[in-house]
Image (cartoon, grey):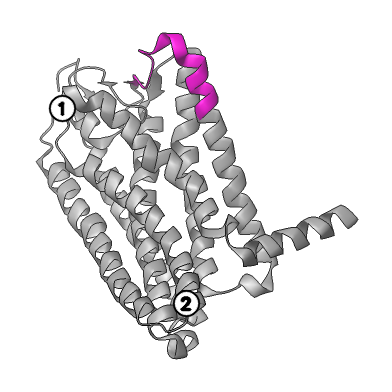
């Protein structure tokens, strides 16, 4: 192999251009990203602790929510700290090992989160459409099996990407015009045949993205249909309240991630894509605890109890 051709698995440099071209507002960008990151980590850990320490919240809905909060902390921690370093120092370099790690956790978290959102939609479908069988269908064993399957599918998918990208060769040091090691952006600099990865990305978008999204929509068509048939106005309001938050996150996360990862990347759209990517990489994980839990009366009551116990100690 020619001397100037580099293997991805070698200790080579990559460069993430991130938002470095906006030199006059670097400090404000750093403060915004830091605030989002700290708020996201704090909110998700807080919800996890509250749910774990409150027996009344040990229900299937909150079990899946805890899985989602842990995933979101892992997700943002794989990307945003490096982005903050680049923004504040101006040093865009990232070693191939760091880039490899970002790709692995990005793929793992995206895939697993899609499956978890499907499980949460199914949980709401059973709770609202067939409530008399809820505890029978959504028992602890089933919930655990669903969560393990989500995680295993996510890991298996990420391992396939890890295997394929470890075999890539590059003719020059990649300068990626993104704030993380975005797969499509990396492939633009490869001298290798990237057909296999291109096919995997397309199949992923359909099987792990579009198909789960359709399942969620079908679940909510049945849910909304059932809610509209309810005689009690208060019952309708409560049911809509519990479902609307899930739909907000689903549309924000699913639509932005699917549209940006499936559409062809062009130079003219790269800057716009970076800002839109922040919606599902940073904003959605920050909003998850707010729309799912912190506006829920049961969680707020449990939080007050926990704060009172902590203050007495």
User: What span is in magenta?
Assistant: 14-32
Disc 1: CA contacts within 10 A as few (<14), some (14-19) or many (>=20):
few
Do the CB atoms of the residues marked 2 and 1 lie less than 8 Å apart? no
- Quarter of the view holding residue 7: top left
- Could you tell whether 157 is left or right of 287 in the image? left
Where in the figure is residue 176, as x and y percent of width and height?
Answer: 28, 23
Q: Is residue 24 within the magenta segment?
A: yes
**Residue that label 2 marks:** 233
Quick one: 134 or 88, which is closer to the camera? 134
N-term-proximal mark, 2 vs 1? 2
- Could you tell whether 250 is left or right of 174 in the image? right
Name the secondary structure under disc 1. Answer: loop
**Residue that label 1 marks:** 266
Position of the C terminus, as image quadrant, is: bottom right
- Asked if 185 appears above or below 131 in the picture, the reply is above
Position of the N terminus, as image quadrant, is: top left
């Amino acid at each position: 192999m020619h001397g100037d051709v580099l293997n991805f698995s070698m200790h080579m440099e990559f460069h993430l251009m991130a938002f470095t071209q906006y030199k006059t507002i670097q400090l404000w960008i750093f403060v915004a990203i830091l605030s989002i990151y700290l708020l996201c980590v704090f909110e998700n850990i807080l919800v996890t602790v509250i749910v774990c320490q409150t027996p009344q919240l040990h229900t299937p809905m909150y079990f899946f929510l805890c899985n989602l909060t842990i995933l979101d902390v892992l997700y943002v921690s794989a990307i945003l700290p490096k982005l903050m370093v680049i923004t504040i120092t101006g040093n865009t370099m990232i070693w191939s090992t760091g880039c490899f790690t970002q790709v692995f956790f990005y793929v793992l978290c995206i895939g697993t989160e899609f499956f978890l959102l499907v499980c949460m939609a199914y949980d709401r479908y059973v709770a609202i459409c067939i409530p008399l069988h809820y505890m029978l269908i959504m028992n602890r064993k089933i919930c655990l099996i669903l969560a393990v399957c989500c995680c295993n599918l996510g890991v298996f998918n990420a391992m396939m990407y890890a295997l394929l990208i470890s075999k890539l060769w590059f003719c020059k040091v990649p300068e990626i015009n993104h704030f993380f090691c975005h797969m499509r952006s990396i492939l633009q600099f490869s001298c290798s045949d990237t057909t296999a990865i291109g096919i995997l990305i397309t199949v992923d978008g359909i099987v792990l993205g579009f198909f789960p999204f359709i399942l969620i929509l079908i679940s909510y068509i049945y849910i909304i249909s059932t809610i509209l048939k309810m005689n009690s106005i208060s019952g309708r309001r409560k049911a809509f309240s519990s479902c609307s938050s899930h739909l907000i996150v689903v549309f924000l996360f699913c639509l932005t991630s699917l549209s940006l990862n499936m559409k062809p990347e062009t130079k003219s759209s790269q800057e716009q894509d970076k800002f839109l990517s922040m919606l599902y990489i940073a904003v959605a994980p920050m909003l998850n605890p707010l729309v799912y839990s912190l506006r829920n009366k049961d969680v707020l009551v449990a939080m007050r109890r926990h704060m009172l116990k902590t203050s007495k100690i």
